[in-house]
Structures are given as C-alpha cells and as structure tokens.
C-alpha cells in the first residue's frame, strides 16, 4: 500500500508592514508581489510611503502589495499552500480621494507563486 502525500497549508506571518497612498489620478501598481529591489524601489516611490525605504535581501524575503480604494488596507491572512502563497486583504468601505497601498514583507522560503501567479506579477 502506497503512502499518500498530502500538501500542508501553513500560516505565514508578516515580518514588517508599511502603508502609503496613490492619488486617484495615478495608475496604481498592478502586481501582488515584489521579488527584487528595482521593483520594490518603484512601488515604494509610487505608493509615496513616508518612511525611509528599508534594504531587503530578496533572496530571502518577498514583499506583498495590495492597493485598494479605502482608508485602511491590510493583509488579514496569509497561507502557504503547496508553494502558492494565498492572501486575504481587508479594506474599509469608505471612499477616500486616494488609493491606499499595503506592503508586507514575508519569508520567501517555499514560495513559488502568490495567489496563483509567478512572483513579481
């Protein structure tokens, strides 16, 4: 009798988080994950994050991005399921005159996709 192998879903905790804003007249960043420093620098500037940009080792870490129209945007749940990091984002129902960016940093180990898409998409 062959042993069955079951994929395990594990919770992933953010290591750091930041928020920023994008004016409504500006096209927001479209990707849900950031896997290199050039993309991170572009998103950081585009989201107008008000603190100094951290230096990140993208060989070990991965940044996640959610941009929505609401005054509060947060990653509520992160689950790693067979290499696919699935995210749940919550947004306040208000309609401020801007888009809010939520950026979180996670451990890259075991992540091959984010929400079914390749890293950086």
Image (cartoon, grey):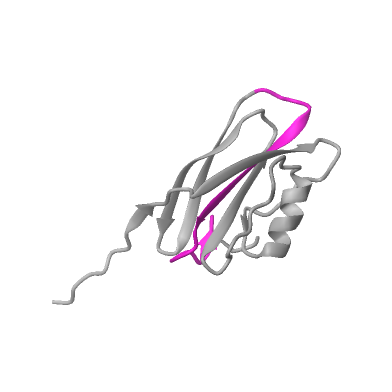
Left of 41 or right of it: where is 34? left
The residue located at (68%, 51%) in the rendering is 53
| Residue 105 shown in magenta | yes
Residue 87 placement, left or right of 9: right
Residue drawn at x 54%, y 58% as measured from the top left: 114
Q: In the rendered structure, which segment of residues is drawn in magenta? A: 94-116
Query: How far across and down, in percent of the image, does residue 78 sit?
Result: 46, 48
Count the labels in the image.
0
The answer to whether residue 108 is seen in the rendering is yes
| Quadrant of the image containing the N terminus | bottom left
Is residue 25 found left or right of 75 in the rendered image? right
Horizontal placement of 62 versus 25: left or right?
left
Residue 6 percent coordinates (x, y): 28, 64
Question: In front here: 65 or 57?
Answer: 57
The answer to whether residue 29 shows anywhere in this view is no
Which residue, as the protein is rendered here, is positioned at the far left?
1
**Position above or below: 36 against 53:** below
Q: Residue 25: say if magenta.
A: no
> Residue at the spot x=71%, y=42% of the render?
49
The residue sitting at the right extreme is: 25
**Furthest residue to the bottom?**
1
């Amino acid at each position: 009798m062959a042993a069955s192998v079951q994929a395990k879903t594990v919770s992933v905790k953010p290591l750091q988080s930041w928020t920023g804003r994008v004016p409504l007249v500006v096209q927001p960043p479209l990707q849900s994950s950031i896997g290199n420093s050039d993309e991170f620098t572009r998103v950081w500037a585009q989201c107008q994050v008000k603190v100094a940009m951290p230096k990140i080792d993208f060989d070990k870490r991965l940044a996640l991005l959610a941009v929505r129209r609401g005054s509060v945007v947060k990653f509520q749940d992160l689950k790693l399921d067979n290499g696919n990091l699935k995210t749940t984002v919550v947004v306040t129902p208000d309609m401020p005159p801007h888009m809010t960016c939520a950026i979180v940093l996670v451990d890259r180990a075991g992540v091959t996709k984010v929400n079914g898409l390749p890293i950086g998409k």
